[in-house]
Amino acid sequence: MTQLTPIEFQATDLDAMATAKGRVAILVTPEGEMNPPARRANKLTRGAVARLLESDRFVKAKSGQVITLAWPGGMAAEALDVLILEKGSSALETRRAGSALGKLKGTGPLLVAAGSYSRAQELAMGIALRNYSFDAHKTGEDAGAEIEPAVLSHNRHERIEASAAPLLAVAEGTCMTRDLVNEPANVLTTTEFAQRLDEMSALGLKVEVLDEDRLAELGMRTLLCVGQGSDSPSKVVVMEWNGGEDGAAPLAIVGKGVVFDTGGISLKPAGGMEDMTMDMGGAGVVAGVMRAVALRKAKANVVGLVGLVENMPSGNATRPGDVVASMKGDTVEIINTDAEGRLVLCDVMWYAQDRFNPAGMVDLATLTGAMIIALGHERAGAFSNNDDFCDAFLRAADAEGEGAWRLPLGKAYDDLLKSRIADMKNVGGRPAGSITAAQFLQRFVRDDVPWIHLDIAGVASVKSDTDFAPKGATGWGVAALNRLVADRFEA
Ligand code: BES
Ligand code: MN
Ligand code: ZN
């Protein structure tokens, strides 16, 4: 796994600022107020900070922005990053500010002299999230360079360190998700994916890998029919975190793990097909959430299930027109083999309910291109059978700066799935494509199970930087779901 930027917490030491290597960051308020570390930097640089605070550039700048003084005289550092931050900034604003520092940091050392800033743990979180780079397949000089730690100095560093710990667990989960999503499909095969999940048993998770024979025994025919054209064996991985009360019904999170989606016999066009390495994004988020809750030893019961398959065309691939029976027993006429995610999820969701009787179920999937048409890359689509549960999730996502927006479900949409020869078709036509996909899934959700479907096709991996991630995989959803666990499932 990509090394998460180590964050060290130290007591404020003004004298260390002169000799610190790499980057040094200080905090000033938008009103130009300096705390003791900022005053020390100002003194070392013979008033450079005060001159900045007088400048037009500073007047125009906003809270959360960084102005860099390069090669500051009187300091050993190569850069003095002046972070403008309002004292009463929210947790999220502070995290964004930390992210601005994390972006500048690169692999070199960074000292953030935060003084007594009260939400400094969120600076650490922002740094850890944004100082991420997926270099696993780069060779050459910088490749594999150790990431130097970020040192956060604070007047109450022990308190800040303690409140940063659960946040950094989420950062680590998020970066695991990013690694999985960024990884190409020749590396992250179904087998390799299962292996990486299995390794999480070291964190105290119970991990079980179900192979094709077992899946056939269980009757997961719609899942298996997606993977049957691939040489990589289909798998379902079940991860259990039992940190809550014995026997308390868990939250189940279920992820689509299509390690590569060619479309199958309904082959996708060549242009952009390489992006379908991210079609396991839902499973990636499930992995990241399980890692986060295990690392922070959440007092909750959470089960994560992922369906790992590869959708390939071949002589024994599923054909358009084939009829396949699901584990639930309902039959599906497969009109388009490129609508494969729902075929994977319906069996895993049914199995999750059957085995765990969950108190709530959330599924995540890069399910439809139509989701990108609807909401772009800003927000994921949310669909639910339970207003209260869905509202709790939307609030959690909002608090973490992870956009989501609810879309409707309803009988008229469900009717579009009617098939002449089977219980349903796997596609409902172009109109409302994301909704009919959700409607398909809902047919496999028990009425008594509060359920949210998250279509993350637009947000799992993006082509430009976001607040908290460089371009590529975002890890969207790990923080929001972790918060949902904390808000609704922890004692
Ligand atoms: N994995 C795709 C959806 C997707 C598209 C995710 C673009 C991320 C970016 C999914 O399996 C798919 O192919 N969906 C089809 C459904 C259609 C055949 C009903 C789609 O969206 O075109
Ligand atoms: Mn597809
Ligand atoms: Zn797909």
Image (cartoon, rainbow, N blue to C red):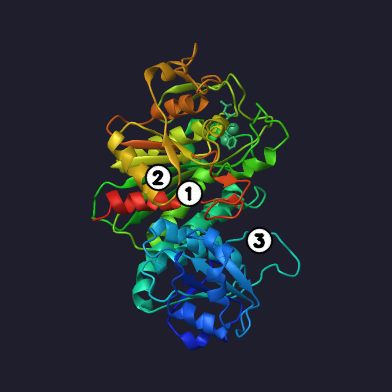
> Considering the numbered disc 2 on the image, is that residue within a helix, a strand or a loop?
strand
- Determine the quadrant in which ligand 2 lies: top right
From what the image shows, is residue 177 above or below residue 367?
Answer: below
The quadrant of the picture occupied by the C terminus is bottom left
Name the residue type under label 1. Answer: Val
The image quadrant where one finds the N terminus is bottom right
Examine the rendered structure and indicate whether residue 427 appears above or below residue 96: above
Q: Of label 3 and label 1, which has the lower sequence position?
A: 3
Q: Which mark is residue 136?
A: 3
Q: Residues within 10 Å of mark 2 (few under 14, many from 20)?
A: many
Report if the CB atoms under discs 1 and 2 are less than 8 Å apart: yes
Q: Is residue 394 above or below residue 330?
A: below
Identify the residue position indicated by label 2 in the image. 253
Residues at marks 1 and 2, CA–CA distance in whole angstroms: 9 Å
For the view shown, which residue lies furthest in the bottom direction? 15
Q: Amino acid at mark 3?
A: Ala
In the image, is the residue at mark 3 within 8 Å of ligand 1 by its beta carbon?
Answer: no
| Percent coordinates x, y for residue 156 in the rendering | 35, 78
Residue 352 position by quadrant: top left
> Residue 320 has which mark?
none
Question: What residue sits right under mark 1 in the picture?
Answer: 285
Which secondary structure, mark 1? helix
Q: Earlier in the sequence, mark 2 or mark 3?
A: 3
